[in-house]
Image (cartoon, rainbow, N blue to C red):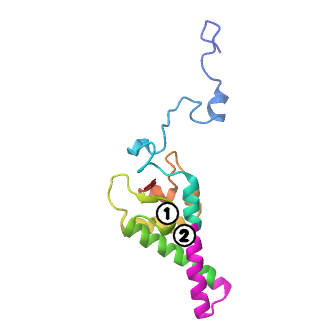
Amino acid sequence: MSSGKGQPAGPRWTQTWLSGARAAGADLGRPGERFGFPASGSGAIAGYGRRLVALFVDWGLSMLVASLLARAFEWSPPQRSLTTLVVFGIQTWLLTGLAGTTLGKRLCGLRVVRPDGRPVGLGWSLARAVLLLLVIPALIWDRDYRGLHDRAANTAVVNI
C-alpha cells in the first residue's frame, strides 16, 4: 500500500500487533501518569526490583516466625509451611491496612497507597492480601505496574 507518492501509507498491519501497542501508535505514557503520580522520587510508582526484594524479606520474616512456632509446638514441615503462608498473609493484611507498608517494603523504601490519597484500610488490604496469596493475580501487571491484587484493591506501590 502506498499513499500515492511512493511512500507507504503507514506501518504494515503485522507491525502493529507484533511490536506491541506503542508500535500501533498508542501513547501509553509513563507508569502512574494517569493517576497523577510523579515521574520519579517520592510518590512515584515503584519498580520491580525493590518490590521483589521486599517480598523476599517479608517471606523470610514469615518463615522465621513459622519456624519458631514449629519448634515450640513440634509441628511437621507441612504444618510449618502452612503457618508461613498464614503468617505472611496476616502480616501483609494488617501492616498494609494499618501502616500502608510491610516490614520488607519499609526496608526497601516502598509503601502501598490509594490513588485518591485515602488510607488503604483493613478491608481493602484484606482483599489485596488474599489475592496476593493466590500468587497468579500478583503476576499479571498493567501499564502502571499494578498487579491484579492492586487493581482490585485500588492501590499502587510507590516510593517513600
Using residue 99 as the reference point, say whether residue 55 is left or right of it: right
Circle 1: residue type: Lys
Dominant secondary structure (helix, strand or loop) of the stretch shown in magenta: helix
The image quarter containing residue 56 is bottom right
- Label 2's element? helix
Q: x and y percent of residue 116 in the render?
A: 33, 52
* Residue at mark 2: 58
**Residue 152 in the image: above or below residue 123:** above
Q: Tell me if I can see residue 140 in this picture.
A: no
- Label 1's element? helix
> Which region shows up in magenta?
57-79
Q: x and y percent of residue 48 in the render?
A: 57, 53
Question: Residue 28: which disc?
Answer: none
Question: Residue 105: which disc?
Answer: 1
**Residue 108 in the image: above or below residue 86:** above
Circle 2: residue type: Asp
Disc 2 or 1, which lies upstream in sequence?
2
